[in-house]
Structure formats: C-alpha cells, structure tokens
Image: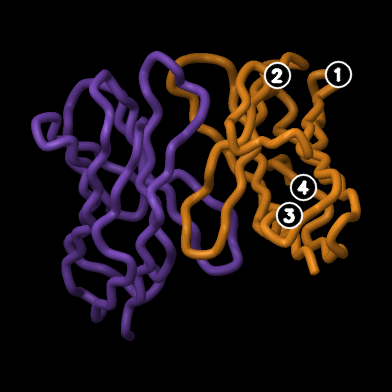
C-alpha cells in the first residue's frame, strides 16, 4: 500500500504526559499537512510542511504542540503536557507541490487523554 | 475568516432516492472547492473538486456538484443513492491564494435505508 500511513492508530495517555505521532506521506509528495478532528466536526488545519520547511501554523497549535519534518519525508507531531481537550483524531495528509493538488489523507491517530 | 457551512447534520434516505447536500462557504476571493467522503472505517477520500471552468463538476460514484458563485454554494447531488453511499460527507474550501490548508465544514452523515 503506497498511501499515507500514520502510527500509532490509537493512543491512550494520562493528562500531563507527552505523546508523539508519526506520519509517512506518499513517497513523491513534498507537501505534508496535519489536521485535528473532534467528534461531530470536520478536520481543522494545524500545520503544513513543504519539504522540511514548516510554512504555516494554525492558532490552534499552542506552545504545547510541535511538528517536525527533518528530512522532508516523514513527520512527527508531539504534544507536551497533554490535556483532556487534546482528545481527538489527528489526521495527516500529503500532496504533490502545485496549485490545486489533491490532499491524500491517512487513517489518523485517535488520541484519548484520561 | 473563511468558513464552510453544511446545512444538514444527518440525512436519512431510502435507496434510489435523490440526494442533495447543501454547502455554503464564506470567502470573498477565488476559491477551490471540494467534497470529501469518509466511508465507515475508511480514510477521508476526495469525491470531487472544482478549480475553474465548468461549474458543474462530476466526481466518482455518480456524484456531481454545482458551483454557484453568486450564492457562495457548492451543493452535492446524486440522482439515485445506493446503500453503499452511507458515509460522512464533508464540503471544503481552500482560498486560491493559499492552496495549502483546507477548511472543512462540520460534515453531513448520510444513512441509506436498504
């Protein structure tokens, strides 16, 4: 399967712990996006990378959140000192560079903070 | 701020009924428009998209959508639904000048009675 993959698929953690999620985009895609989806809502944009450069961050991305894409391939999203409000599905997507390219989504990582 | 409104939270239809899901967006400039679908247990996937040209766009599985600029609308239609169309449908927009983040609506859950 050459689609977008995410790991882990599910994560349960206690409030105050740090968690890290990984996304592997489609190999020839140089754009990578992170979204967050809560119950009953559509995905909300968090941040995006073009190659290794983080080009845009949402105001939703508080200081506790950090994303990296060090070699322009896979990306990690870390949440420090998790809060119950961080419980959500975290989605990754990738696309080729260019106007109007379709974003392809991964299966998501479901986070539950107890 | 840009936003997307989907009028119906949950739609229930019988097989062979016609479908129309409403979508309105709020943005003053040129936009790219999308409908994404999420079948139970599957990833978000693109159903259709509009970038320019003919405002009537045809997508996969017999779906189509019409862009009406004067109404800021992009409604999704299908003349005859099938049980396999049961899914969550998301309308989405990207400002043409910033074709990075996608702004999603809150989604419409479609249930088809066999």
- Tell me how far mark 3 sits from mark 2, CA to CA: 21 Å
Q: Which chain is purple?
A: B
Query: Which chain is indicated by disc 3?
Result: A
Residue denoted by label 1: A71
- Mark 3–mark 4 contact, CB under 8 Å? yes
Residue denoted by label 3: A109
Residue denoted by label 2: A54
Residue depicted at x 61% and y 36%: A46
Residue denoted by label 4: A6
Query: Which chain is indicated by disc 2?
Result: A
To which quarter of the image does residue A28 belong? top right
| CA neighbours of label 4 inside 10 A, class few (<14), some (14 to 19), many (20+) | many
Circle nearer the viewer, 1 or 2 = 2
| Mark 4 or 2, nearer chain start | 4
| CA neighbours of label 1 inside 10 A, class few (<14), some (14 to 19), many (20+) | few
Q: Which quadrant of the figure contains the C terminus of chain A?
A: bottom right
- Residue A45 placement (x, y as % from top left): 55, 37
Are tags 3 and 4 found on a single chain?
yes
- Tell me how far mark 3 sits from mark 4, CA to CA: 7 Å
Q: Which chain is orange?
A: A
Query: Which chain is indicated by disc 1?
Result: A
Residue depicted at x 26% and y 38%: B25
| Mark 1 or 4, nearer chain start | 4
**Taking A65 as reference, is B88 above or below it?**
below
| Mark 3 or 1, nearer chain start | 1
């Amino acid at each position: 399967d050459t689609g977008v993959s995410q790991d882990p698929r599910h994560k349960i953690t206690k409030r105050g712990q740090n968690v890290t999620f990984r996304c592997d985009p489609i190999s020839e895609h140089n754009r990578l996006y992170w979204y967050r989806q809560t119950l009953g809502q559509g995905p909300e944009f968090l941040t995006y990378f073009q190659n290794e450069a983080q080009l845009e961050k949402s105001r939703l991305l508080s200081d506790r959140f950090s994303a990296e894409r060090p070699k322009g391939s896979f990306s990690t999203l870390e949440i420090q000192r998790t809060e119950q409000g961080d419980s959500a599905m975290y989605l990754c997507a990738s696309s080729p560079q260019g106007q109007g390219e379709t974003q392809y989504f991964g299966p998501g990582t479901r986070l539950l903070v107890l | 701020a840009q936003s997307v409104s989907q009028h119906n939270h949950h739609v229930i239809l019988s097989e062979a009924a016609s479908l129309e899901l409403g979508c309105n967006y709020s943005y003053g400039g040129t936009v790219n428009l999308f409908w994404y679908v999420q079948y139970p247990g599957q990833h978000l996937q693109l159903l259709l998209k509009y970038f320019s040209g003919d405002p009537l766009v045809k997508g996969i599985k017999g779906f189509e959508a019409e862009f009406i600029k004067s109404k800021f609308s992009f409604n999704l239609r299908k003349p005859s639904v099938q049980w396999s169309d049961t899914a969550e449908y998301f309308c989405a927009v990207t400002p043409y000048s910033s074709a990075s983040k996608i702004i999603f609506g809150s989604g419409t859950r479609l249930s088809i009675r066999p």
